[in-house]
Amino acid sequence: MDVLERIHQQVTQNPVIIFMKGTPQFPMCGYSSRAAEALKSCGVPFGYVNVLADPEIFENLPRYADWPTFPQIYVNGELIGGCDITVEMFQRGELKPLVEAATAQAPQGE
Protein backbone atom coordinates (compact mmCIF):
# COMPACT_ATOMS: atom_id res chain seq x y z
CA MET A 1 0.00 0.00 0.00
CA ASP A 2 1.25 3.47 -0.91
CA VAL A 3 2.23 5.62 2.09
CA LEU A 4 -0.34 8.33 1.24
CA GLU A 5 -3.01 5.61 1.11
CA ARG A 6 -1.87 4.36 4.54
CA ILE A 7 -2.10 7.88 5.93
CA HIS A 8 -5.54 8.36 4.39
CA GLN A 9 -6.71 5.06 5.87
CA GLN A 10 -5.51 6.07 9.35
CA VAL A 11 -7.13 9.50 9.06
CA THR A 12 -10.48 8.13 7.90
CA GLN A 13 -10.62 5.14 10.26
CA ASN A 14 -9.98 7.17 13.42
CA PRO A 15 -12.50 9.87 14.37
CA VAL A 16 -9.67 11.69 16.17
CA ILE A 17 -6.01 11.04 15.42
CA ILE A 18 -2.74 12.81 16.11
CA PHE A 19 0.40 12.28 14.09
CA MET A 20 3.10 13.15 16.57
CA LYS A 21 6.72 12.71 17.55
CA GLY A 22 6.57 9.98 20.16
CA THR A 23 3.42 8.70 21.84
CA PRO A 24 0.85 10.39 24.08
CA GLN A 25 2.48 8.62 27.04
CA PHE A 26 6.05 9.43 25.93
CA PRO A 27 6.07 12.47 23.62
CA MET A 28 9.41 13.27 22.01
CA CYS A 29 8.91 17.02 21.51
CA GLY A 30 7.20 19.84 23.34
CA TYR A 31 4.70 20.60 20.58
CA SER A 32 3.56 16.98 20.39
CA SER A 33 3.37 16.86 24.18
CA ARG A 34 1.15 19.95 24.45
CA ALA A 35 -1.17 18.83 21.65
CA ALA A 36 -1.52 15.31 23.10
CA GLU A 37 -2.22 16.76 26.57
CA ALA A 38 -5.00 18.94 25.12
CA LEU A 39 -6.55 15.88 23.48
CA LYS A 40 -6.17 13.75 26.64
CA SER A 41 -7.83 16.52 28.67
CA CYS A 42 -10.94 16.16 26.52
CA GLY A 43 -11.46 12.68 27.96
CA VAL A 44 -12.21 10.90 24.69
CA PRO A 45 -10.25 8.12 23.01
CA PHE A 46 -8.05 9.11 20.09
CA GLY A 47 -5.64 7.38 17.78
CA TYR A 48 -2.03 8.32 17.33
CA VAL A 49 0.86 7.63 15.00
CA ASN A 50 4.44 8.02 16.16
CA VAL A 51 6.00 9.57 13.05
CA LEU A 52 9.49 8.88 14.42
CA ALA A 53 8.78 5.14 14.24
CA ASP A 54 7.68 5.28 10.60
CA PRO A 55 10.12 7.19 8.36
CA GLU A 56 7.77 6.92 5.35
CA ILE A 57 4.97 8.68 7.21
CA PHE A 58 7.44 11.22 8.65
CA GLU A 59 8.62 12.09 5.13
CA ASN A 60 5.22 12.11 3.42
CA LEU A 61 2.66 13.37 5.95
CA PRO A 62 3.47 17.03 5.17
CA ARG A 63 2.35 16.35 1.56
CA TYR A 64 -0.92 14.70 2.64
CA ALA A 65 -2.64 17.88 3.82
CA ASP A 66 -0.04 20.43 2.77
CA TRP A 67 0.89 21.05 6.43
CA PRO A 68 4.65 21.13 6.96
CA THR A 69 5.03 20.50 10.69
CA PHE A 70 4.25 17.99 13.42
CA PRO A 71 2.05 17.30 15.23
CA GLN A 72 -0.96 17.13 12.95
CA ILE A 73 -4.42 16.54 14.43
CA TYR A 74 -7.31 15.27 12.33
CA VAL A 75 -10.96 15.15 13.40
CA ASN A 76 -13.52 13.39 11.21
CA GLY A 77 -10.94 13.08 8.46
CA GLU A 78 -10.11 16.79 8.36
CA LEU A 79 -6.94 18.48 9.53
CA ILE A 80 -7.71 20.87 12.35
CA GLY A 81 -4.09 21.96 12.69
CA GLY A 82 -0.99 21.54 14.78
CA CYS A 83 -0.07 22.28 18.36
CA ASP A 84 -0.89 25.99 18.55
CA ILE A 85 -4.32 25.67 16.94
CA THR A 86 -5.22 22.61 19.02
CA VAL A 87 -4.16 24.23 22.31
CA GLU A 88 -6.00 27.46 21.43
CA MET A 89 -9.15 25.48 20.59
CA PHE A 90 -8.84 23.67 23.92
CA GLN A 91 -8.38 26.92 25.86
CA ARG A 92 -11.43 28.46 24.15
CA GLY A 93 -13.53 25.39 24.98
CA GLU A 94 -13.93 24.43 21.31
CA LEU A 95 -11.84 21.25 21.18
CA LYS A 96 -13.76 19.08 23.65
CA PRO A 97 -17.19 19.39 21.98
CA LEU A 98 -15.58 18.82 18.56
CA VAL A 99 -13.82 15.60 19.55
CA GLU A 100 -16.78 14.40 21.64
CA ALA A 101 -19.08 14.79 18.63
CA ALA A 102 -16.59 13.01 16.37
CA THR A 103 -16.21 10.04 18.70
CA ALA A 104 -19.96 9.87 19.37
CA GLN A 105 -20.59 9.48 15.63
CA ALA A 106 -17.96 6.75 15.28
CA PRO A 107 -19.27 3.20 14.92
CA GLN A 108 -18.81 1.31 18.16
CA GLY A 109 -17.31 -2.18 18.19
CA GLU A 110 -19.45 -5.01 19.49
Image (cartoon, rainbow, N blue to C red):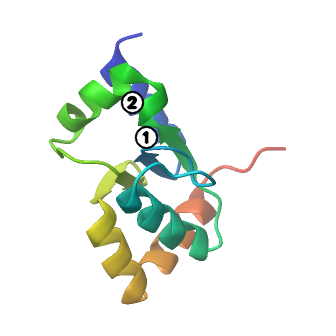
108 sits left or right of 21 in the view: right
Front residue of this view, candidates 75 and 82: 82
Q: Residue sitting at 32 percent across and 64 percent down? A: 83
Asked if the residue under mark 2 is in contact with the one under mark 1, i.e. CB atoms within 8 Å, the reply is: yes
Q: Position of residue 99 (x, y in %)?
A: 51, 68
Q: Residue sitting at 51 percent across and 52 percent down? A: 27
Secondary-structure class at tag 2: helix
72 sits left or right of 75 in the view: left
Q: Residue sitting at 84 percent across and 44 percent down? A: 110
* 92 versus 9 height, above or below: below
Q: How many marks?
A: 2
72 sits left or right of 101 in the view: left
* Quadrant holding the N terminus: top left
Q: Position of residue 80 (x, y in %)?
A: 30, 61
* 4 versus 104 height, above or below: above
| Furthest-top residue in this view | 1
| Furthest-right residue in this view | 110
Name the residue carrying label 2: 7
Mark 1: few, some, or many residues within 10 Å (few <14, many ≥20)?
many
Query: Looking at the picture, which amino acid does disc 1 mark?
Result: Val
Q: Position of residue 66 (x, y in %)?
A: 15, 41
Mark 2: few, some, or many residues within 10 Å (few <14, many ≥20)?
some
Q: Residue sitting at 35 percent across and 12 percent down? A: 2
Front residue of this view, candidates 70 and 98: 70
Q: Position of residue 73 (x, y in %)?
A: 38, 55
* 41 versus 16 height, above or below: below
Secondary-structure class at tag 1: helix
Please tell me the numbered disc located at residue 36: none
Name the residue carrying label 1: 11
Query: Looking at the picture, which amino acid does disc 2 mark?
Result: Ile
